Image: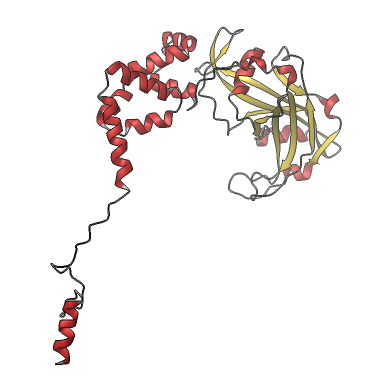
Amino acid sequence: MRDVIAGTAGLSRGKNPLSGRLYPDKHMPRRSKPAKHTDMPRRSKRLNALRLLSLPAEICTHVLRQLASADMNAVCALQRSCTMWNAMVADESLWKSMCEQFYAQPTKMLRAAGKIPSFRIFFVQQAASRLPVSICFREHKLSDMHWTAEICVAPFSWKAGTVNPPAVALTCNFAALPADGKIMFDSDALGDVRLCTTEQFLEKERGKHSDYRLWVWLRWTVRRADGKGTCVYNSIPCSSAYERERIITDQETECSNFDEGYHGSERWYRDETQDGFFHVLPDGSLTLSCSDGWVMARGVGLKFLLDDGGSSLIEHSADEQATLDVLNDFEWA
């Protein structure tokens, strides 16, 4: 009897007496299935994209041009919204017109030389996912900038948070870019700077990247008159065993190397004195020698080399405006 009562009690509560699970009774109100809120934004974005496509073609092109001139990430999102936008974004004629509007001179010259395989890639490289610079950088004069060179002796790699103090740090400003296009401090400015002993310089230690225990690092930073600064070079100019052997034999040796962390080499810059457009690569140099068992710093420099997309590098022609344009593309904070 108790089992029967328990069974009817279960029915009255909307419970299956055999399984004990709840089930909806016909007299009980059904609960509606909760809406998946995650689907709503996706549907609205797609609907908005389709609504845009219902506009005339010239208006759609205008919308795409405005997005491309402000935010390339928005263009990528629009391209993924539907196949029609994907086809419109992939149209090379659109990007050709964008390049001709925002980068008329390099587009004309490089196209004539056959160095633009894709107008979309060229536009992205030039814009660097940012709105093309509308305010000319000429308002920041080279004479108002302070250049700082720091030389540091440290391992090839170190743990996060480790501080490697510089052996020497020098700051100077220039009324104009030097005639050879090279920013530098010579031995008169450096003085007698001892970096490390020859034994430390040649000491080897097995590691992932190299068998030398210590390396000579060079860092160049620039600070504008408004207080903002940027790092334009941070690398190891002296990177070969041959250069080390020359230095310890009392031969004054100038070592130079490109900064491997520099990511602006795909941009094209106008150089008036060379009459063309080039990739610009910052090249740091360090002159070292050995005296009385010590490795000495005799000179430190920085110059910008021009690459025309071929196999040869041309020394910077001291075009001050081209240098300012290059500096403008660094991150200032």
Give percent across and percent down for residue 308.
52, 15
Give percent across and percent down for residue 200.
76, 45
Residue at x 64% of width, y 14% of height: 138
Q: Going by the image, does 193 lie left or right of 84?
A: right
Give percent across and percent down for residue 182.
71, 19
Give percent across and percent down for residue 312.
55, 17
Which corner quadrant holds the N terminus? Answer: bottom left
Circle count: 0
Above or below, comparing residue 167 to residue 95 in the picture: below
* 272 vs 8, nearest the viewer: 8
* 257 vs 179, nearest the viewer: 179
Q: Is residue 217 visible?
A: yes
Q: Going by the image, does 241 lie left or right of 87?
A: right
Q: Quadrant of residue 316?
A: top right
Residue at x 60% of width, y 21% of height: 326
Q: Going by the image, does 68 lie left or right of 130?
A: left
